Image: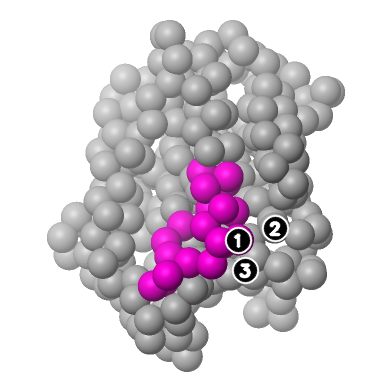
Amino acid sequence: MYKNLIKTNVEIKKMKEAGKIVSNVLKMISEYIVPNITTGELDRICHDYIVYEEKAFPACLGYNGFPKSTCISVNDVVCHGIPNDKKKLKDGDIVNVDVTVIKNSYHADASKMFFVGTPTILGKRLCYVTKKSLDLAIKIVKPEICINKIGKIIQSYVEKKDFSIVKDYCGHGIGKKFHEDPQILHYYNKNYKFLLKENMTFTIEPMVNAGSPNIKLMKDGWTVKTKDRNLSAQYEHTILVTNKGCEILTL
Ligand code: MF3
Ligand code: CO
Ligand code: CO
């Protein structure tokens, strides 16, 4: 069962290349996230950078029919926001840009939050807690720990800060395919048990809501919003389990 979850050295080398590209994209786009730019424009900038500068492919484009190259999720959008030319960013917005690329047939996937202008106190705190929940999880990843420890540490930290964890979406194995086994839950499930092994690659991508954890899928079939329309934040990295711990491939 473990066998196809473990990457070869050749595969890992390719994923590191893809990971570097994803982190370059997220760094590159940062300066464009200003009031009045549209999410459609941000998507085009990412697309052109990935294709023409990095000679890679934006994995979201055409994935299960997804129409754009990135997911851009603003304020109460939990994930899978579709970039468009009508949605203008405004001062105080919190924005997640989620980028997945394919390079030499291998994927890497990461996302982070950006502030438009001056963030609200709540927006800033929500992003801080979400980022820290991911960092805490990354710190405990190593061979032979039980996979459910990842969700346990994320959920307990987030709830201690009086925010809530979205349970409808999870992290995932990643490699030649965008979404592979295993699923990475961001909450504790005592029955979800197996041990991590060296050279597994997966994402951790907690979605944290300021209000209730409940979500609603919009009529476009992709955009996921908080049911109570409160703010939501997400951070994501692609992780490689190493002999003593783990390495972030999208740093
Ligand atoms: N990047 C998302 C993830 O973290 C998946 C987006 S799928 C898309 O797994 F089709 F919406 F792009
Ligand atoms: Co992902
Ligand atoms: Co992603």
Left/right placement of residue 84 relative to residue 249 reads right
Q: How is the image coloured?
A: one colour
x%, y% of residue 208?
65, 51
Is any part of residue 50 visible from this angle? no
x%, y% of residue 124?
52, 57
The residue carrying pointer 3 sits among few (fewer than 14), some (14 to 19) or many (20 or more) residues within 10 Å by Cα, namely many
The residue carrying pointer 2 sits among few (fewer than 14), some (14 to 19) or many (20 or more) residues within 10 Å by Cα, namely many
Residue that carries the numbered disc 2 in the rendered image = 210
Say which quarter of the image contains residue 14.
top left
Q: Amino acid at mark 3?
A: Val
Q: What residue is rendered at 15% in x and 60% in y? A: 53
Residue that carries the numbered disc 3 in the rendered image = 77
Q: Is residue 40 magenta?
A: no
Give the vertical position of 183 relative to 29 (above or below). Answer: above
Q: Amino acid at mark 2?
A: Ala
x%, y% of residue 227?
79, 68
Q: Nearer the viewer, residue 85 or 47?
A: 85
Mark 2 or mark 1, earlier in chain = 1
Is any part of residue 192 visible from this angle? yes
Residue that carries the numbered disc 1 in the rendered image = 122
In the picture, the disc for residue 102 is none
The stretch in magenta equals 113-131
